[in-house]
Image (cartoon, helix red, strand yellow):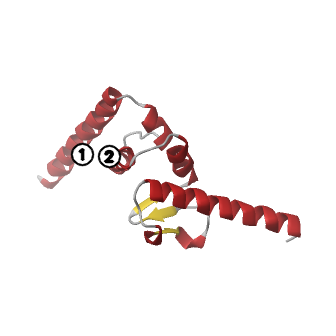
């Protein structure tokens, strides 16, 4: 690798680290509970048991996200993914009104009920 490319990669990794740890600290995480999965800055960042990417990190910093907004979005995504419901990225979630978020959560709750009913129905046979 030439020096210019190495310097670019080094700068990228430093920037990723600075952004990720700044976001983690904003949300109240201890930096020692955070790390890059597979030690790859810019990939998947783990904050305790939460896994995110640079898109969420930069959106959270740019839009001054709070812990409650992050945890609400993260929980919604886990539940939505489990039942096959569309889930917005973090930046879009932050742009939703309270009413839009409530509607999105209601859709997931309805899908969860249908999913559980389907499982229950299958076990009745």
Task: Please name the residue that numbered disc 2 is placed on.
Answer: 83
Residue at the disc numbered 1: 115
Give above or below for 33 relative to 59: below
The correct choice, above or below, for 47 with respect to 68 in the image is: below
User: Residue 118 location in percent, x, y?
Assistant: 21, 46
The percent position of residue 48, horizontal first and vertical second, equals 40, 66
Give the left or right position of residue 84, taking residue 63 as reference: left
Location of residue 65 in the rendering, given as x and y in whole percent from the top left corner: 45, 44
Asked whether the beta carbons under mark 1 and mark 2 sit within 8 Å of each other, the answer is yes
Quarter of the figure that contains the N terminus: bottom right
How would you rate the neighbour count of disc 1 (Cα within 10 Å): few for under 14, some for 14-19, many for 20 or more?
Answer: some
Instruction: Give the total of numbered labels.
Output: 2
Comparing 114 with 99, the one in front is 99
Q: Position of residue 121 (x, y in %)?
A: 15, 47
Circle 1 sits in a helix, a strand or a loop, which is it? Answer: helix
Q: Quadrant of residue 113?
A: top left
| Residue toward you, 45 or 31 | 31
């Amino acid at each position: 690798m030439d020096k210019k490319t190495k310097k670019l990669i080094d700068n990228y990794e430093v920037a990723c680290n600075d952004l990720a740890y700044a976001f983690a600290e904003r949300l109240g995480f201890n930096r020692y509970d955070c790390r890059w999965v597979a030690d790859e800055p810019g990939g998947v960042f783990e904050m305790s048991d939460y896994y995110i990417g640079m898109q969420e990190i930069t959106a959270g910093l740019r839009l001054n996200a709070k812990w409650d907004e992050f945890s609400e979005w993260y929980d919604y995504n886990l539940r939505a993914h489990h039942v096959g419901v569309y889930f917005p990225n973090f930046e879009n979630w932050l742009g939703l009104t309270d009413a839009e978020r409530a509607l999105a959560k209601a859709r997931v709750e309805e899908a969860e009920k249908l999913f559980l009913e389907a499982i229950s129905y299958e076990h009745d046979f």
